[in-house]
Image: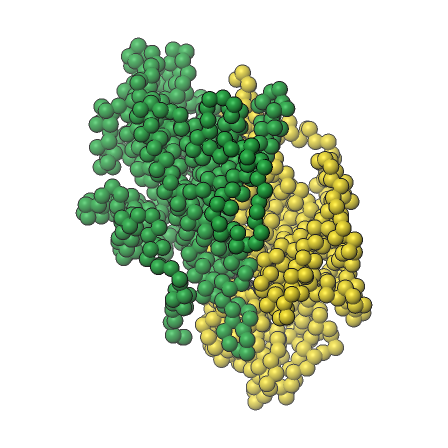
Chain colours: A green, B yellow
Amino acid sequence: MEDIVDHLAFERNKTQFDVDEMKIAGSLHAFEVSDKMARLVASDPAFRKDDRVVLDRKALFMNTLRKTAYAWKRIIELRLSEEEAAMLRSFVDQPAFTDLHWGMFVPTIKGQGTEEQQQKWLPLAHKMQIIGCYAQTELGHGSNVQGLEKTATFDPKTDEFVIHSPTLTSSKDIFLRYDFNSFDADLNSGGLVDWVSLSSCERSLDDHLPLPGITVGDIGMKFGNGAYNSMDNGVLRFDYVWIPRNQMLMRVSQVTREGKYVQSSVPRQLVYGTMVNVRQTIVSDASIALSRAVCIATRYSAVRRQFGSKKGGLETQVIDYKTQQARLFPLLASAYAFGFVGEWLKWLYMDVMKRLQTSDFSTLPEAHACTAGLKSLTTSATADGIEECRKLCGGHGYLCSSGLPELFAVYIPSCTYEGDNTVLLLQVARHLIKTISQLGSRKKPVGTTSYIGRVEQLMQYHSDFQKAEDGLKPNAVLGAFEARAAKKVIACAQNLSKFTNPEEGFQEFSVDLVEAAVAHCQLIVVSK
Amino acid sequence: MEDIVDHLAFERNKTQFDVDEMKIAGSLHAFEVSDKMARLVASDPAFRKDDRVVLDRKALFMNTLRKTAYAWKRIIELRLSEEEAAMLRSFVDQPAFTDLHWGMFVPTIKGQGTEEQQQKWLPLAHKMQIIGCYAQTELGHGSNVQGLEKTATFDPKTDEFVIHSPTLTSSKDIFLRYDFNSFDADLNSGGLVDWVSLSSCERSLDDHLPLPGITVGDIGMKFGNGAYNSMDNGVLRFDYVWIPRNQMLMRVSQVTREGKYVQSSVPRQLVYGTMVNVRQTIVSDASIALSRAVCIATRYSAVRRQFGSKKGGLETQVIDYKTQQARLFPLLASAYAFGFVGEWLKWLYMDVMKRLQTSDFSTLPEAHACTAGLKSLTTSATADGIEECRKLCGGHGYLCSSGLPELFAVYIPSCTYEGDNTVLLLQVARHLIKTISQLGSRKKPVGTTSYIGRVEQLMQYHSDFQKAEDGLKPNAVLGAFEARAAKKVIACAQNLSKFTNPEEGFQEFSVDLVEAAVAHCQLIVVSK
Ligand SMILES: Cc1cc2nc3c(=O)[nH]c(=O)nc-3n(C[C@H](O)[C@H](O)[C@H](O)COP(=O)(O)OP(=O)(O)OC[C@H]3O[C@@H](n4cnc5c(N)ncnc54)[C@H](O)[C@@H]3O)c2cc1C
Ligand SMILES: Cc1cc2nc3c(=O)[nH]c(=O)nc-3n(C[C@H](O)[C@H](O)[C@H](O)COP(=O)(O)OP(=O)(O)OC[C@H]3O[C@@H](n4cnc5c(N)ncnc54)[C@H](O)[C@@H]3O)c2cc1C
C-alpha cells in the first residue's frame, strides 16, 4: 500500500485569499452555529450516513425514525436553541417525517391559527406529541391548487365540517402522513366557495390508527438510493369525515357558528408572506446543495490526474484542463451567488412583513414574483449542476460512495414542489408584462423590476465589452443583463399587444415569455 | 371508483400519419423481431420488472442471476436466432453479468483471437461455460488507457506472462467479474512496451474461487434504484499471477516463444473497426432510451389536465401548453434522429470493414472521429432528455412507478464509459483541426468532413431564413449547420495558428474546440 498523501494540501497552500473569511461568507454567528452543529453530527456514530444507500426501504425508514428521535433527545439534552436545532437537523441530512412538521405544519399554525388555536396546538407540536404534515395538492391537481376537488361542507346541525374526497383524482397524493395534518380544501359553505386551512385529526392519538373514513397509504418507491425513500410520502382519502368547526385555522378567515364565511381584520396577504419565507429557504438550500456537489467535484479534479505525463512524471491534474474549468467554475460561482441571493431574500421577507403590519401591500406582487422566479432559477440550475459535478468525477461519480447520486436524487424534487419551475416562470412573466402595461400609469415599477422604468434608455443599450477583462467590471455586467432582460420583456409585450384576447397571446408566446422571465431572474442574481 | 377511460384514444385518433409505418422506421424485419421479442418478455411473469426497485442489493443480484439463466433457457427452447436472442436480452432490460460477456468478451475473442484460440474458447463462451468480462481501465486510469500501470512481463523460462498490479491505482476498478476476463495490460517484454490483449483464467473453473494472487471484489452501490445495482461491477488486483503465453490473444500481434513481440499481417486497425461497431450500438441505444422517456412523458402530457377549465368544463391537456411542447417535441425529434444516425452508422461500420479487407485505411480516422463524436453527442442529449421528461411529468415523474428514475440511473453511465464525452469531443476537435491543416495537401476531407473542402464558400454563407417555415426546408437547414460548423472550426484553427507550440494552443482553446466539435456532430445528425 502506498503512503497516504494529502493531495489537496498543495492546492490549499496556493490560495490567495483568507480561507476562514471565505468560509464565513454570511455572518460569523451563522458560521459558528453551523460549524458547531456539523462537528456534533459528524462525531456521533449514531448519525452515520454511509449505510444509508444499502438499507432496504423498511430498514431505511426505521433508521430515520431512530435518528430523528435521537436528534430530538440530543436537542433537549444540550438545550440547543431553535436555530441550532434546525441546523442540527439539516446536518443529519436525511429526509424525515418531521421535516414538514417543522417546516410547514408549525409555521402554518403560527401564521394562520388564532391565539387560542396556537395555545392549544403549538405546545403539543413543539413536544412532538402531535406530528403534522402538509397535504395541499391532490392526485389530480398539483400546480393548479385552485382546481382541488376535495370539499369541506359545513354542517350547522353538528357545528362540524364534512371533509370528502369525491373522486380518485381528489385523493391526496404526495404528503407526509402522521398524527395530524394541515391542508387546503374547497370550502363549500352556504354557497360560498373559498379557501380555508383546516387541521384535522387524521389519526387517533390513542392507537395511532387512521380515524374511520380516512384512508392513508405510502406512495411507494421514489427516485434514487436513500433520498426521499427515508420517509413516507403518502396518499390520503376522506370518505365523509366530520371534524369540529374549531379545527379550521381561523386567524385570517372564519366560518361562524351559523355557517357564515367572514374575513378577519388580519390581512390575507400574510399567506403570501409565508410563501416568500419558504422560498427564501429553498434558495438558500440551493446554494448549500450546489456547494456540496461543487466541493466534491473540485476535490476530485484536484486529486485526479489523467494524461499529459512528461518523461514519466506526474500526469496533469484534471482541474488544470480548461474544459473541466469551464464546466466546474461557473457552478462554483453560482453556489456563492445563490447564497448571497438567499441572504438578500431574508431581508426582503422582513421588509415585506414590516410593510404588511402597516397595511402597505405595494411591494407584495413584486416580492412574490421575485421569489417565485428565484426559486425556479436556482433549483433548476442546482439540479443540473449536481449532475454535471457527478459527470466531472468520471466513472467514480457513478458510485454512491462519491455522495453525488444521493445528493442528486434528494435534490431534484425541489424543481417540482413549492411550484413547478415552468409554471413559476410563467407567473413571473405575467408580472413583468403587467409591470410594462402600467408604465404610463402612476404605478411605478418597484424593487427588482425598477429597471423597467428605464426601459427606453435600456433599449438603446450597446455593449462596450471589448475584451474578456471587461467582464470583471460589475457595472458593465449589470448593464448588459438589464438591457438583455428589458429587450426580451419588451419584445414579448409588443407581440402580446397584437392579440385582442391577451390570454391567447400569452399562451401563443409562452416560450418567449419564459425566456424573458429567466433573463429577468438572472439579472436579479447578478444584481444582489 | 370511476370508470376506466382510454384518455389516449382521443389523441391517437387525431394522427395524420400511418401509425404502423411510423413504428417501423427501420426495416420491417427488425420491427417484427423486436415486436415478437417484446411480447414474449412482456407476457412472461418470470420477467416481471415492477419489483426491481424494492429489492435490496443481494435480492436484486439473485433476481438477475435467475432472469439471465431463464432467458438463456428460453433462447434454447425456442431456438431463437442470434438477432432474436440479443433482442430478447435487451427487453429483459436489466444490467446483467452477461452483458459484457456478449457485448465485449465474445467479440474480442472473435476479433483478436487466432483461429485456434477462437476454436478453443468460443464454444465454451457460447454455452456460457466460461463467462467473461472486460477489464480495461484501472482505478487510476480511465480515460487515459495508455497510462495503465498493470504489467505483463514475459518469462521465457516458463513460457508464461506474469501479470501484476504494482500500485493501488492499478487495481481494476469498474468491470464485470466472472470466470474469465479479457483485459489490456502494459506488455513488458524484452524492453518493448506495447499493448496486448490477454485472456486470463481469473477464477478456477472447478470451485469458481479466484485463483491464487488474484483479488476480486464488488465495487459497491451505484446510482439509483435497480439500475446497475443488478450486477457486480468490481475490483480486480493481480499479485504476480502467472498465465500461459497462449492466453494472449494473438491474431493482431504476438509474443513468440523467445519473447519477441511481432505484428501479424492482420491490420491493427481492425481494433478500431470493433470500436466503430460498439459505438454504433451506443448511438442506437440512445435512440431507444430517449424514445422510452419521451413516450412516457408524451402519454402523461396527453392525459394530464391542469388549469384552464372554462365554465366547469375539462381543464387543458398539458400537452397543449406551448412551453410543454417546446420542452418535449425537440426530444421526440431527437429520438427519431438518433435512430436514423444509428442506422447510418451500421452502414459506416460495414463500409469500414470492407475497406479494411482491401487494406484501404483512408476513411478510418474520419470514421473514428465521427463515431466518437456521435457517441458523445447522443448520449449527453439522451441523459439530459430523460431527466427533462421526468420533470415534464411533474411530481409523478419522481415516483419509481413512472419508470423514469430507473431509466435515468441506468442510462447516465453511457456518458462516461466507452470514452468520457468531453474527452471524445476533444478527439473529434483534433481530427477537425488536422483536416483543416491538410486542406492544401493531396489528402482531401472525406465523409462527414467533406464540407470542410468547401470552407471558403461556407465562410461567405448568409442565412436566408425569413420565417419559421423556412426551417422546414432540409437544404436550408443543412446549409446553416454546415456554415456554423465550418465557421467555428476555422475560428479555432486561426487561434491555434498563433501558437508556436500547437499543444499549448490546443489546451488554451479547448473550450472553443469542444464547441466546434459539437457543431460538427450536430451537422452529422442533421445530414443523415
Ligand atoms: C418529493 C415531493 C414532495 C411533495 N410534498 C408535498 C407535500 O408535502 N404537500 C403537498 O401538498 N404537495 C407535495 N408535493 C406535490 C407537489 O407540490 C406537486 O407535485 C407540484 O405542485 C407539481 O404539481 P404536479 O405534480 O401536479 O405537476 P403538473 O401540474 O401535472 O405538471 C406536469 C407538467 O405540466 C406543466 N404545466 C402544468 N400547468 C401548466 C401551465 N399552466 N402552463 C404550462 N405548463 C404547465 C408543468 O410544467 C409540468 O411540466 C410533493 C412533490 C414531491 C415530488
Ligand atoms: C457503469 C460503468 C461501467 C463500466 N464498465 C467498464 C468495464 O466493463 N471495463 C472497463 O475497463 N471499464 C469500465 N468502466 C470504466 C470507464 O471506462 C471509465 O470510467 C471511463 O473511461 C472514464 O474514465 P475515468 O472514470 O477515469 O474518468 P476521468 O478520466 O478521471 O475523468 C474525470 C474528468 O476529467 C476529465 N478529463 C480527463 N482527461 C481529460 C483531458 N485530457 N482533457 C480534458 N478533460 C479530461 C473528464 O472529462 C472528466 O470530467 C465503466 C464505468 C462505468 C461508470
Residue A50 visible within the image:
yes
In the rendered view of the protein, which quadrant contains the N terminus of chain A? bottom left
Establish if B120 lies above or below B320. Answer: below
With B29 as the anchor, is A28 left or right in this view?
left
Q: Is residue A352 left or right of residue B130?
A: left
Identify which residue, A177 or B429, lies in the foreground: B429
Q: Is residue A93 left or right of residue B299?
A: left
Which of the 4 image quadrants contains residue A271? top left
Residue A43 drawn at (x, y percent)? 27, 57
Q: Position of residue B244 (x, y in %)?
A: 58, 80
Quadrant into which the C terminus of chain A falls: top left
Q: Quadrant of residue A235?
A: top left
Residue at the spot 36% in from the left edge and 22% down from the top edge: A268
> Where B269 falls versus B421 (above or below)?
below
Write the residue at 65% across / 61% down: B495
Task: Compare residues A470 and B195 and report the one nearer the observer.
Answer: A470
Residue at (29%, 53%) from the top-left corner? A35
**Residue A511 screen position, x and y as percent:** 59, 34
Percent coordinates x, y for residue B519 in the rendering: 67, 52
